[in-house]
Amino acid sequence: MNKKTKTIIWVVAAVLLVVLLAVLLMDVVGGAKKILFDEFAVLLKETFTGTDINGDGVITKITELSVEPYKWTAVVKDGDKVIATYTTIAPEIYSFDSLYSFFALLAPEHVNSGLSQLPFSLEFADPNAGSIWSSLLPFFGLILLCVVFWMVLRSTSGANPSSMNIGKSKAQMQSNLKVRFSDVAGAEEEKEELKEVVEFLKSPKKFQALGAKIPTGVLLVGPPGTGKTLFAKAVAGEAGVPFFSVSGSDFVEMYVGMGAKRVRDLFDMAKKNQPCIIFIDEIDAVGRRRGAGLGGGHDEREQTLNQILVQMDGFESTESIIVMAATNRADILDPALLRPGRFDRQITVNLPDVKGREQILKVHARNKPMAPDVNFKTIARITAGFSGADLANLLNEAAILAARENKKFIENVHIFDAVDKVEMGLKKKSYVMTEEDKRIIAYHEAGHAVLAGLCKYCDPVHEVTIIPRGNGAGGFTMTRPAEDSVFTSYNEMLDDICMTLGGRVAEELVVKNVTQGASGDLRMVTATARRMVTQYGMSDKLGLVAYDSDQPVFVGMEYGHTDKVYSEETAAAIDAEIRRLTSEAHARATKLLMENRSILDNMARVLVEKETIYTEEVEMLMKGANWQEVIAEMDKNGEERMKNPFASMVKDEPKTDEPKTEEPVAEPATKAEEPAQNAEETPADGENTNE
Ligand code: ADP
Ligand code: MG
Ligand code: ZN
């Protein structure tokens, strides 16, 4: 705020003060006695009846009465001399008629023939006219206030003239956003998926002319700080369309009914500005599963959610509005939100891997002077588990440290100190990975992947990563079916069990100290084995009998299964069979991994270095390539892969629209996943055990 506006504000404030004082003084000088309306009515009654009603020995005779809305004043005069003035806050009286009925009520015998016979003179203020002063004062005040606000606003928000608030909807509209895809680093696959949305927003007519069905809603799912908001803005920026943003939590703080109204306002506004993007950040605040949760008081949220659904369903095919939303947790969202025509497109935004982190660092270092020996590769290497926001924060902290030392450049020391500092904050949230954690997870995932490669009936490996994905997975190994096969044969199931046990077995072989990371795997193995025995009749001992009812069985539901239709002995036999199947698979997995130990070691090493590998690398490793060769190859192809992140996926099969992660429910696991490596449970001593 500059000096000139400051003085203006002071002057305005002073004027306001003087006006206020004047109003107060006028009241005091008038010397009217303020009384309750009941007392006032008594005085009026005394005037009409001429009797001492309040028993104070005086019969008050009002000589003048002035009636304004809410403010009545009575003057008692003796000749020309004012004896007393009374004022009260009164109910509003709209007309002479209503005033007359009031008097008639007050003193029925004495008020019978019209107002002309009143014992006092009456001044009846027209509510529309009023005295000049009293009606102009608030008006002036308002104008002054507006001026002051306008000045304050202008002096603070002058920086961004293109953003504005939409009425009461609390949403922000921004046009001409400067954010581009190039500002979002590393997330190539996500970008690729969003490019389609950009294209549609750029030329909606082209798509509509061909009758193409356009996505209404795009849901960005991913951990905090991975750039979901940034992505939404980049889409608007790339397409050059207005961006209406609102946060889910904005809807819930207000009175009942406000949330729904805000949603309506927001969508109305968007409809007038097509094509455009509506972005609902943190949609879980309103979009939580209905009827779940604690206590009552969900009305407001539900109404808001319903309104969002209604609005999205109401889109015509000619409308070119895309609703984007972001959440950390898709699993708690109301399923209604995910139905076709609503947020039917989900894009997972993951924590960045080494390469992604390097690129994010480069983006955020663009306007920071770096010492020449700062190596982003190294920083990326030591920041596993950091999100994009953490990395931005890291460079900012480093800049602050450098500035404090009056340096011209940000040097390595500053960065390493900043890493420690940011990490400390992250440790509390327990998702930071030490080198030892990385090594354990790498062996675990390599165990899955190597066995998937060795077992004849396992699907080929698509991706292996040690970067946590989604809720609490330490890493994962993803296979994709080579062809669509609905049947899962005995051999496939056995191989699947073997491969799923691979993580645990690798830990047993190498780390000699098994972590809790394999519990998810074990649950899955047990589930598959149980199905083999009890549903598919795949055990000779128990024969061709389906012991469990034929309801679709979900992994994880099995333990709660109570409606057993067989005896205790059979139950024991089933358990024994499950144990036999799994321990045989365990033995086979151990044998295979011991025989192929060098592949396991090499793959784990590549994973520690690169964090994520794909089909090609897995194949190279399975053929016996050592880790240096694979890494060299990856570095060589690196540039190309950046340009076309799908190269490896579309190599020998046409791109299907089959989702690439989630497995169909009834099929055995193709994806092995396990709970988070909790950083607090592998404490500092993890770093100084073996190398
Ligand atoms: P989210 O909405 O997923 O919580 P944001 O979009 O708010 O995350 O990201 C916060 C900040 O982190 C961004 O403003 C940006 O500076 C930084 N950031 C996150 N991801 C990236 C990325 N992929 N590339 C560049 N910067 C990123
Ligand atoms: Mg966000
Ligand atoms: Zn596993």
Image (cartoon, helix red, strand yellow):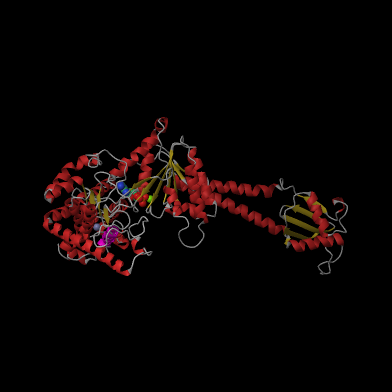
- Residue at 48% x, 57% y: name it: 291
504 relative to 181, above or below: below
- Residue at 37% x, 41% y: name it: 235
Q: Is residue 618 visible?
A: yes
Residue 176 at x, y = what percent? 40, 38
Magenta stretch mostly in which secondary structure?
A: helix
Q: Quadrant of ligand 3?
A: bottom left
User: In the rendered structure, does residue 300 fall within the stretch colored magenta?
Assistant: no
Camera-nearest residue between 668 and 647: 668
Can you say which quadrant of the picture contains the C terminus? bottom left
User: In the rendered structure, does residue 528 fall within the stretch colored magenta?
Assistant: yes
Residue 481 at x, y = what percent? 25, 46
Camera-nearest residue between 22 and 421: 421
User: Quadrant of residue 344 in the image?
Assistant: top left
Residue 145 at x, y = what percent? 56, 49
Q: Is residue 675 left or right of residue 240?
A: left
Which residue sits furthest front? 544
Q: Is residue 411 visible?
A: no
Number of disc labels: 0
Residue 136 at x, y = what percent? 66, 47
User: Quadrant of residue 441 in the image?
Assistant: bottom left
Which residues are drawn in magenta? 517-533
322 relative to 41, above or below: above
